[in-house]
């Protein structure tokens, strides 16, 4: 029950944010768990998969192993996970270790998110950009390794 209430509060907060989205391929700059800055434009020339998720989100947790496997098997793809929750860095690091996540996890201030990321979306949501930085897909809900391959290799 407590997780359900937290989920509903977080979704309400997401819905209350009124920034613009990155649907136009707008660049963003976010920091990973080690303090390194990542910009969407840093990855031009590769497919970029931006996955909005949270540790408390069961569908997010279910899709992560597919993302890990996909990242491991595709050199022309960079997955970026955006941890869209108010969580301590150590909690996120523990989660990354537990799930053996092999791609950067970026953090965001959910109470004051940048306007260049999605702010009004359910979790998980995945946005895929082609090597030129154009958005080619936005999926609300979990994705599998097969879904990722179909979106990147139509």
Image (cartoon, rainbow, N blue to C red):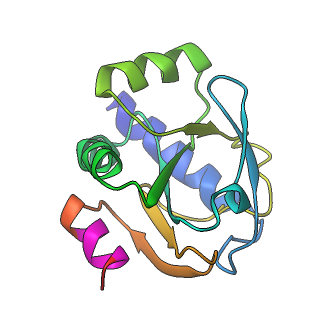
Question: In front: 119, or 3?
Answer: 119
What's the residue at 65%, 22% (across, down)? 34
Please determine whether, in this image, residue 10 is positioned above or below residue 22: above
Residue 148 drawn in magenta = yes
Q: As drawn, is 61 to the left or to the right of 94?
A: left
Residue 115 drawn in magenta = no
Position of residue 77 measured from the top left corner of the image (x, y, whole percent): 44, 59
Q: As drawn, is 145 to the left or to the right of 72?
A: left
Position of residue 73 measured from the top left corner of the image (x, y, whole percent): 27, 51
Position of residue 50 measured from the top left corner of the image (x, y, whole percent): 52, 58
Overall secondary structure of the magenta section: helix
Question: In front: 103, or 22?
Answer: 103
What's the residue at 32%, 49% (across, down)? 67
Q: As drawn, is 133 to the left or to the right of 96?
A: right
What's the residue at 58%, 53% (across, down)? 12
- Residue 117: image quadrant is bottom right
What's the residue at 25%, 46% (across, down)? 69
Q: Which residues are magenta?
A: 147-152
Residue found at the far bottom of this picture: 154
Q: As drawn, is 69 to the left or to the right of 135?
A: left
Question: In front: 88, or 131?
Answer: 131
- Residue 28: image quadrant is bottom right
Q: How many discs appear?
A: 0
Please determine whether, in this image, residue 105 is positioned above or below residue 73: above
Query: Which quadrant of the figure contains the C terminus?
Result: bottom left
Query: Which quadrant of the figure contains the N terminus?
Result: top left
- Residue 36: image quadrant is top right
Please determine whether, in this image, residue 132 is positioned above or below residue 47: below
Residue found at the far left of this picture: 146
């Amino acid at each position: 029950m407590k997780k359900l209430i937290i989920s509903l509060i977080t979704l309400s907060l997401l819905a209350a944010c009124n920034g613009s989205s990155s649907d136009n391929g707008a660049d963003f700059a976010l920091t990973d768990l080690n303090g390194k800055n990542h910009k969407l434009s840093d990855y031009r020339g590769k497919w970029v998969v931006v996955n909005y998720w949270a540790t408390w989100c069961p569908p997010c947790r279910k899709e992560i192993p597919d993302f890990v496997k996909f990242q491991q098997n595709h050199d022309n793809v960079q997955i970026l996970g955006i941890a869209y929750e108010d969580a301590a860095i150590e909690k996120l690091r523990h989660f990354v270790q537990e799930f053996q996540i092999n791609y950067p996890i970026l953090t965001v201030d959910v109470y004051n998110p940048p306007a260049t990321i999605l702010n009004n979306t359910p979790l998980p949501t995945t946005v895929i950009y082609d090597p030129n930085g154009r958005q080619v897909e936005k999926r609300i809900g979990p994705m599998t390794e097969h879904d990722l391959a179909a979106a990147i290799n139509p």
